Amino acid sequence: MMTRFLMFLCVSLSSAIAVAQQDWDAMDVLDGPNPTLRYGFYTEVSGQVMMGRYYFIDDGSNLRVRLVPFGKTAVELPVEEYDRANGVLELAWEGKPERRCRLNRQNEGLFLGNCIENLAVLPIAIRIANEYDVEWQGTHFPVSETDLAIVARATQILAGQSRRNTDGDRNCDDDVKSEVVSVFCALYVASLGVDGVYRHRRPAIQTVRDELRSRYPGEYVHTLRDINNDVEIPDADLIEALESARSTLQSTLGAIRE
């Protein structure tokens, strides 16, 4: 029994270390609960509270943290100190040398604290995904006029450019700058313009996913990204798919109102 336990322990530690040593770029961000993926929020100096996803990789001796917002460039949060005994975590912030964060472990699944940038106090939380994150992403939202407007705006964005970005990576900073966007980034930009926030599982986004899957069945890590990046699919076909998704949403909304 002891021998089997020791073997299990060695394999577990080896797996944890292997995960911790992986290059960030080799790891894909998964949606939903995952041993390396946590959710939470962070606050900008403007006061805007942003929902975030965090890689939180801990092999028992070393901790690595990375912030991966939807549609934005990932940000490294170098661990400056982690007092495991007392649960105190201090982080720096890539690209913002004046920002420092201090969080306290509330339990095994939650860290709460503040970042300080100049004189601004910016609340931050890192936690294992919970029902609030599911709701914030719009998973249980009913279809609304907002969904119709998002898909309509995204369709206009795609139709108004000379070509789509077929090398999409779900980072929309460069798409917006170049004015050549992918399907995902069209929906992301449209969501910000219509609703002020991007919700990854709201009906507008999910209906587009479902429409694309019905037209292009297959195994995809990320439906919106991977189907968009298929250069064999004409831009016009994807625009037509978005128009069809909007019709589905319109029918659903009409049924709700009856």
Image: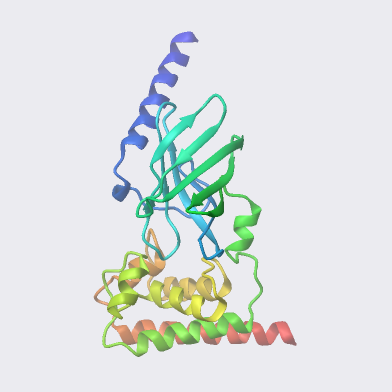
Residue drawn at 34 percent across, 66 percent down: 226
- 105 relative position to 230: left or right: right
- 82 relative position to 24: left or right: right
Which image quadrant is residue 58 in? top left
**Residue nearest the viewer, comparing 104 with 226:** 104
Rendered image coloring scheme: rainbow
Q: Where does the image place residue 225, in percent across and percent down from the top left? A: 36, 67
Q: Residue furthest right?
A: 258
Q: Where does the image place residue 212, in percent across and percent down from the top left? A: 42, 74
Residue drawn at 32 percent across, 64 percent down: 169
Q: Residue furthest front?
A: 119
**Rendered view: 49 above or below 108:** below
**Residue nearest the viewer, comparing 116 with 167:** 116
How many numbered callouts?
Answer: 0
**Rendered view: 49 above or below 164:** above
Placement of the C terminus among the 4 image quadrants: bottom right
Q: Residue furthest top?
A: 2
**Rendered view: 109 above or below 51:** above
Q: Where does the image place residue 156, in percent across and percent down from the top left? A: 42, 89
Which image quadrant is residue 166 in? bottom left
Residue drawn at 26 percent across, 88 percent down: 162
- 253 relative position to 28: left or right: right
Q: Where does the image place residue 255, in percent across and percent down from the top left? A: 69, 84
